[in-house]
Structure formats: C-alpha cells, structure tokens
Amino acid sequence: MTPEDGGTLLTHWRLRSLPLALERRIFLRRETIHFTYRLGNLSDTSTPFLWAWHPLFNFKRGDRMLFPGTMKHCHSSGLGESYPWPCLETGNDLSRAEFLPGATPAAKVFLGPFHIGHAEIRSAKGARLILSWSASVMPFAGIWITRGFWKGLHHWAIEPTNSPVDRLSDAGMASPLTSMAPREVRSWSVTVKCSMTENSGTD
C-alpha cells in the first residue's frame, strides 16, 4: 500500500530486555485492517521470544465466536490439561461467553495448533468480524473472556500467539517457534475484516 492509498502507520521498537527489534505496519484497505510484523534478532546467539496479539473486543449478548471445525479441544497454559471446546463443563459455552450461575464468569484458555489462522466473531444481527493470521508462525490462539469478572467489563479476546503460554520462561517447552536463530528475521501478519454478509462455512 502506498501513502496515496491512505498511508501506513509504521512503528519500531528495540527491546531493552532482549536483543530484538520489532517493526509493525498498520494500514486500511476498504473494510480490512492489515497488521504486518517483522522481528529481527540482533544477536549472534539464539534468543527466545513470546508474542501474542492482544485485541479486546466488546461483548454483546448474542455474539458468538467461531473457529474452524477441527477445533474440538482447548488447553490450559502450556498445552496442559485438555478440555472440550467450547464447553469446559456442562452449561458453560465459551464460544458464546455463557457461564453457569455461580461459576466464575471469566476464562483464559488456548486453542491450536492451527493449520490456517482463522476466526470470527458473529453478532445475532449478522455482522461478522473476521480474523486471519499467519498460522505457520503463530499456530496458537489464546482466548480470554470476562463477563463482568474483571473490573466489571464485558469483553473477550482472540490472541494469535507463537506459544500457548503467558510467560516467556514457559514458552520453549510448549512450542519450538519461540527461538530466534542468530540474526534471524521473522515476519507475520494479522488482518481484521468487517462484514455484514452471513457465512456459515466456519461452523
């Protein structure tokens, strides 16, 4: 995309804690927001990294989270205990952010590995928010949901990531994609598309 098309928001970070440099580009094309990332290892030795996209989407009653039909299980951190997706227990449905009366109205789990990075949030009125990402680099997705449990907020997140953990110290045990070779450069992307057209193919 060129500046004439609307421009690109470019951001650079050079980490203090690790010898890594991250570049992010954001641009809008019609109804799709494009995020591209480029991570470089500035060191002559291997360096670990953990990355997760962390959008918070507002939740409204009737919304539904959809993934490819192969996603039948989710996991606790680090590919730990496996649970049926989307119902961790009878009566709870994480894909609809529904919790049993008396249950803690929040959850954090991981899905994956994905062969194709794809997910949707679909409203009861038919609006769709479609997420796509580079599953070859980010094969997992963290799922965070709160129905008033955290600061009274009602939101959820779909978080593409290179390892199904929340701490860098645990990342390597769960995924080999968390180590950057000396001077390696790695790239990936995330797109978010808005649509009012129904599509039942993700079920």
Image (cartoon, rainbow, N blue to C red):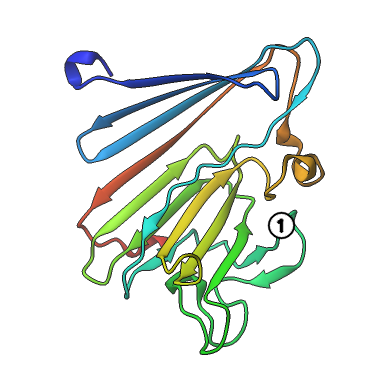
Residue furthest to the front in view is 151
Q: Is 20 above or below relative to 72?
A: above
Q: Quadrant of residue 50?
A: top right
Image point 58% across, 71% down: which residue? 85
Q: Which residue is mark 1?
A: 77
Image point 62% across, 57% down: which residue? 110
Q: How many marks?
A: 1
Which quadrant would the C terminus be assigned to in this image? bottom left
Secondary element under disc 1, as helix, strand or loop, is loop
181 relative to 2 in the view: left or right: right
139 relative to 96 in the view: left or right: right
What amino acid is labelled 1 in the image? Ser
Out of 25 and 119, give the one closest to the viewer. 25
Q: Quadrant of residue 196?
A: bottom left
Q: Is 191 above or below relative to 43?
A: below
Image point 60% across, 68% down: which residue? 72
**Percent position of residue 167, x then y:** 71, 45
42 relative to 131 in the view: left or right: right
Q: Residues within 10 Å of mark 1 (few under 14, many from 20)?
A: many
**Percent position of residue 156, x then y:** 45, 61
Which quadrant would the N terminus be assigned to in this image? top left
Q: Is 176 above or below relative to 45?
A: below
**Percent position of residue 184, x then y:** 68, 16
Image point 26% across, 31% down: which residue? 28
**Percent position of residue 149, x then y:** 50, 71
Out of 160 and 72, give the one closest to the viewer. 160
Out of 35 and 152, give the one closest to the viewer. 152
